[in-house]
Amino acid sequence: MYLEEAKKLGDELWVIVACSAMVNHKPKPLLPEKQRLAMLQALKVVDHAVLGDEHDMFKPLTDIQPDIIVLGHDQHFSEVDLERELTSRGINAKVVRVTKHEPCSTCSSGAIIRLVLEKNEVTTHGKLRF
Amino acid sequence: MYLEEAKKLGDELWVIVACSAMVNHKPKPLLPEKQRLAMLQALKVVDHAVLGDEHDMFKPLTDIQPDIIVLGHDQHFSEVDLERELTSRGINAKVVRVTKHEPCSTCSSGAIIRLVLEKNEVTTHGKLRF
């Protein structure tokens, strides 16, 4: 949904996949970064997917020079601050946020993880059943 | 990997997604069938994905009339028995099995579920942390 909305805003959709070392504001991703990258690259809606830089989140943006940067509804950046930071680095991109999303109980990795844990709790009282 | 190998064997790749009611030989899928279908349809390698029939697994095959049916390395059908059954229903398809697969600790839904449960066990001794 997020990627489809993003794609509608331009001609070519690039996705930057967070490398695991850069995820410090929430639990580390469960799946290895190479697998997450391959999953994104396999999607019809995605034209190009690349791994983010380990140290500098602006590095791939400097290479790609996008016209528009699309944030998800829950991404923790301010559009105004990000646009200002981009301009200071010579990246003239408009930052927009996709607000439309369907609430769905199984449509995020976090939601699926919670579902696995709840189901395990309910069906086996702590014993692994899968 | 399985889908890519299957795609190489023909021109057009159809995927039949098991409807949840038909899965009785192992635990029911965690994700709803419509979501599993949408995920398959979103993949570049997949030309068409359809939901299987609730009662008759041969129904969609009668509609699609494939030239080749590709089984995964762990699918519980015998190639010979299946081919015989197909012929008796007027479906003249060759049944082949993809044997090539990379062992990968995070490359199946079962493996990911086990990873979630193990990680939860190790990091929190039973308390949900995600």
Image: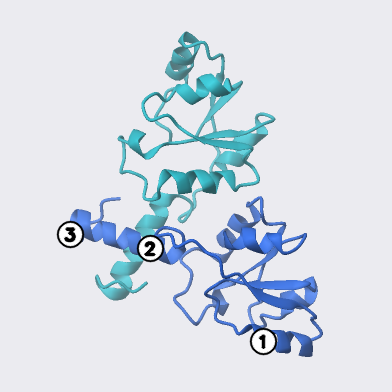
Chain colours: A blue, B cyan
The CA distance from mark 3 to mark 2 is 17 Å
Residue B9 in the image: x percent, y percent? 65, 30
Which quarter of the figure has residue B116?
A: bottom left
Residue A65 in the image: x percent, y percent? 80, 74
- Relative to the observer, which residue lies in front, A38 or B34? B34
Left/right of residue A97 with respect to residue A25 in the rendered view: right
Q: Which mark is residue A48?
A: none
The CA distance from mark 3 to mark 1 is 48 Å
User: N-terminal of the two: label 3 or label 2?
Assistant: 2
- Relative to the observer, which residue lies in front, A71 or A32? A71
Residue of label 2 = A113
Q: In this view, does B87 lie above or below A80?
A: above
Residue of label 3 = A125
Secondary structure beneath label 1? helix
Say if labels 3 and 2 share a chain. yes
Point 43% across, 59% down: residue: A104
**The C terminus of chain B is located in which quarter?**
bottom left
Q: Could you classify mark 3 by the number of other residues whose Cα lies within 10 Å: few (under 14), some (14-19), or many (20 or more)? A: few
